[in-house]
Image (cartoon, helix red, strand yellow):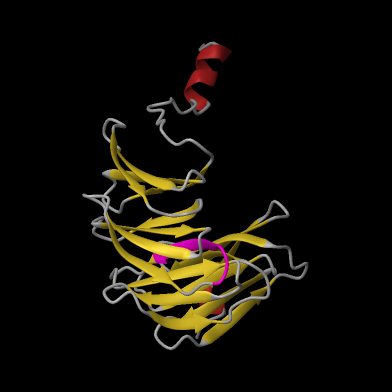
């Protein structure tokens, strides 16, 4: 008969092993994102910079320096040619990933920009701010297409669905809102009975669910088609 120790080794999942430790930022790290092809890792920090790294060997590739304040969030374009960063200096910057040069600086928010994301086609960017608004930007021109008076407290996360037709936003006001990306119309407001502040929201890869994280230590999944018809 197999020993209990041998049985435990075959049934209990083994812990992950550390592969790389990436060092270089001088202050706290605020966001970590993979490119869609998995070849790059981007990090942002309160030290006012973003960095890219190779996922194959952990080597440092590029530093993105130019913001006047710390960076809270970042996002790759779908082809990983560009990187968008959201900063406490009230701007969003678009960077050329290969050169580290600023391509566009998006201005308009009146308080810290806390979150940012590309749509799947990478021709639009959505950002959320402590000014309680969500803004939609045209990537090519750098112009703001829409200002959505989204929430009554800071916006904590913004995300496009898989075909880029919907935007979801979350806020410390305890609400998640689903928006039509083309018109800016609010299609649905999701409200929890206890209304805890929402720290994060994201569409599932298939676009059928919304995952919500709240400051009361809860994760909630909503089936999207219960709310959008």
Report the predominant secondary structure element of the magenta stretch. Answer: strand
Q: How many marks?
A: 0
Judging depth in this view, the residue of 160 and 141 nearest the camera is: 141
Residues shaded magenta? 110-117
State the image coordinates of residue 199 (x, y, percent, origin top left). 62, 58
State the image coordinates of residue 127 (x, y, percent, origin top left). 47, 68
Identify the residue at image location x=38%, y=76%: 137
Please state if 51 lies on the left or on the right of 11 as rendered: left
Quadrant housing residue 218: bottom right
Please state if 18 lies on the left or on the right of 28 as rendered: left
Residue 139 seen in render: yes
Asked if residue 162 lies in the magenta stretch, the reply is no
Residue 208 seen in render: no
Identify the residue at image location x=38%, y=53%: 66
Judging depth in this view, the residue of 77 and 103 nearest the camera is: 103
Seen in the picture, residue 228 relative to 64 is either above or below; the reply is below
Judging depth in this view, the residue of 226 and 120 nearest the camera is: 120
Seen in the picture, residue 180 relative to 77 is either above or below; the reply is below
State the image coordinates of residue 224 (x, y, percent, origin top left). 52, 74
Identify the residue at image location x=32%, y=68%: 120
State the image coordinates of residue 131 (x, y, percent, origin top left). 60, 71
Identify the residue at image location x=28%, y=70%: 121
Quadrant housing residue 171: bottom right
Quadrant housing residue 152: bottom right
Seen in the picture, residue 145 relative to 125 is either above or below; the reply is below
């Amino acid at each position: 008969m197999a020993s209990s120790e041998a049985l435990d080794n075959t049934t209990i999942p083994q812990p992950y092993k550390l592969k790389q430790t990436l060092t270089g930022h001088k202050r706290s790290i605020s966001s970590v994102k993979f490119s869609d092809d998995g070849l790059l890792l981007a990090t942002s920090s309160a030290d006012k910079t973003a960095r890219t790294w190779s996922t194959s060997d952990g080597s440092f590739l590029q530093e993105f320096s130019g913001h006047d304040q710390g960076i809270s969030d970042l996002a790759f374009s779908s082809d990983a040619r560009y990187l968008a960063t959201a900063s406490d200096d009230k701007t969003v910057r678009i960077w050329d990933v290969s050169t580290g040069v600023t391509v566009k600086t998006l201005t308009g928010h009146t308080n810290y920009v806390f979150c940012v994301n590309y749509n799947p086609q990478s021709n639009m960017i959505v950002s959320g701010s402590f000014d309680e608004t969500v803004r939609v930007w045209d990537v090519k021109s750098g112009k703001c297409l829409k200002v959505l008076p989204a929430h009554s407290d800071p916006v904590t996360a913004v995300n496009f669905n898989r075909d880029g037709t919907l935007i979801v936003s979350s806020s410390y006001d305890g609400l998640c809102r689903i928006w039509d990306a083309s018109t800016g119309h609010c299609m649905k407001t999701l409200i929890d009975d206890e209304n805890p502040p929402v720290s994060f929201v994201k569409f599932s890869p298939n676009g059928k669910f919304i995952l919500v994280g709240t400051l009361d230590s809860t994760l909630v999944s909503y089936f999207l088609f219960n709310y959008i018809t």
